[in-house]
Image (spheres, grey):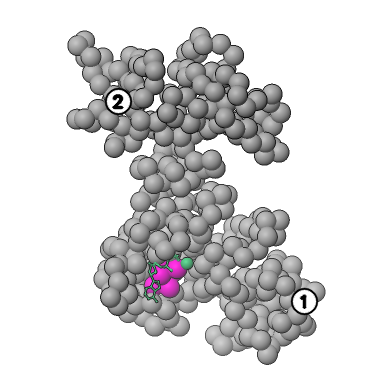
């Protein structure tokens, strides 16, 4: 049976500091792989330590399956925390490292041995079982730490940037192993990371944090496609969302007009009827907004004739970045630079004039 985890108005204020975790509400469903994504210092580690019982909860509540854990000691919560830098017992073999937490919890010997073998296979550490931790590479140590958490079968698994010290291919392999194991075992897992690509790749749901607060929670595609604030829009995606200063006003006939600021000649259009509902909810008293568009919602087009949902900007190519599987082309238009996601093989050249169409049906507007 998997365990649900919830935090209600949970805060942690370090002595003399501002809240590291600030009145956080969080609901992790039983069996979910929940990823907390945020920049360094946003309170991710503190949040995990509060759940594990290693950090006091100064205000609010923590519950497992609806039962309060707020004042329970760490050992009574049964949440396993895997640290960013793997911590193994240096004087014990890998096998004993794997067995230790299960033995400490009174799991009978045959059951322990079976679990060690299963975990060692899942995490590819079977050939390392008789080695000493000091003879292992960083990646091998992290596999052992993950396997050990699995042998223990905690109610809740907490992972603090477990892959951040590994090189890219190993990171990708371990991510896959984690998702495979997590689906099979159904252990409720909360992973924190500053790596947006990792969060999107792993999460059932991702919670974006900044300065101790959760700003938005949702399935990866939802948070990526419909960010609810500028921070989320710019933290997710590589390159990040393009932001263009814009105005949204109503003309004498009550029709919406969207214009981009700073362009010569000015670019202003009536918002097409089918997009009116999408745009109306962004109306502000000042009319000033930022128009957010992901690089894949821009295209370099041949002619200036707008497509059915498109706007076209004219500009000059100032940078072409071939990335192997795609190319990022930067186009300067007036005072703005937009980044366009392009196919791998394009003939874009720095200095050339380019027409960039904007897919406004995918735009998000942000109040200034
Ligand atoms: P993250 O894991 O997202 O990088 P942390 O939870 O480690 O963030 O830290 C959140 C904030 O709390 C930061 O401003 C950090 O400086 C502060 N902080 C973390 N640990 C302590 C501590 N033991 N004492 C005082 N301040 C701390
Ligand atoms: Mg941290």
- Quadrant housing the C terminus: top left
Q: Residue at x 52, y 51 (%)?
A: 196
Give the alpha-carbon distance from disc 1 to disc 2, as whole Å.
62 Å
* Left or right: residue 111 compared with residue 263: right
**Residue annotated with mark 1:** 128
Q: Which mark is residue 141?
A: none
From this view, report whether residue 271 is shown above or below residue 18. Answer: above
Q: Residue at x 59, y 62 (%)?
A: 164
Foreground residue, 32 or 34?
A: 34
Callout 2: helix, strand or loop?
strand
**Residue annotated with mark 2:** 247
Do callouts 1 and 2 mark residues in contact (Cβ within 8 Å)? Answer: no
**Mark 1 or mark 2, whichever is nearer to me:** 2
Which mark sits nearer the N-terminus, 1 or 2?
1
**Residue 238 x/y as whole percent:** 54, 42
**Residue 25 x/y as whole percent:** 32, 59
The magenta region covers: 45-51
């Amino acid at each position: 049976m998997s365990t649900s985890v919830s935090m209600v108005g949970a805060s942690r204020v370090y002595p003399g500091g501002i809240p590291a975790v600030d009145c956080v509400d969080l609901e992790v469903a039983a069996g979910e792989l929940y990823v907390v994504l945020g920049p360094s210092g946003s309170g991710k580690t503190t949040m995990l330590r509060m759940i594990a019982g290693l950090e006091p909860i100064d205000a609010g509540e923590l519950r497992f399956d609806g039962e309060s854990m707020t004042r329970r000691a760490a050992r009574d919560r049964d949440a396993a925390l895997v640290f960013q830098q793997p911590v193994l017992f240096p004087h014990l073999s890998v096998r004993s490292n794997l067995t230790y937490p299960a033995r400490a919890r009174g799991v009978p010997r045959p059951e322990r041995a079976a679990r060690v073998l299963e975990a060692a296979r899942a995490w590819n550490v079977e050939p390392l079982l008789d080695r000493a931790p000091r003879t292992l590479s960083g990646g091998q140590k992290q596999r052992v730490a993950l396997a050990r958490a699995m042998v223990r079968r905690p109610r809740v698994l907490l992972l603090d940037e477990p892959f951040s010290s590994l090189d890219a291919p190993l990171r990708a392999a371990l991510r896959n192993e984690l998702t495979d194991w997590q689906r099979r075992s159904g252990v409720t897992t909360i992973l924190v990371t500053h790596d947006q690509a990792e969060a999107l790749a792993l999460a059932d749901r991702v919670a974006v944090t900044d300065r101790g607060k959760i700003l938005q929670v949702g399935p990866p595609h939802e948070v990526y496609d419909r960010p609810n604030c500028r921070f989320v829009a710019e933290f997710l995606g590589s390159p990040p969302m393009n932001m263009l200063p814009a105005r949204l006003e109503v003309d004498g006939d009550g029709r919406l007009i969207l214009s981009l600021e700073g362009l010569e000649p000015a670019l202003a259009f009536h918002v097409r009827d089918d997009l009116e509902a999408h745009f109306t909810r962004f109306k502000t008293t000042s009319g000033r907004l930022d128009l957010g568009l992901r690089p894949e919602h821009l295209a370099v087009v041949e002619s200036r004739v707008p497509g059915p949902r498109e706007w076209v900007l004219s500009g000059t190519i100032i940078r072409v970045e071939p990335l192997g599987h795609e190319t990022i082309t930067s186009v300067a238009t007036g005072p703005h630079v937009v980044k366009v996601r392009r196919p791998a093989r394009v003939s874009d050249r720095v200095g050339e004039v380019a027409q960039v169409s904007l897919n406004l049906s995918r735009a998000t507007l942000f109040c200034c």
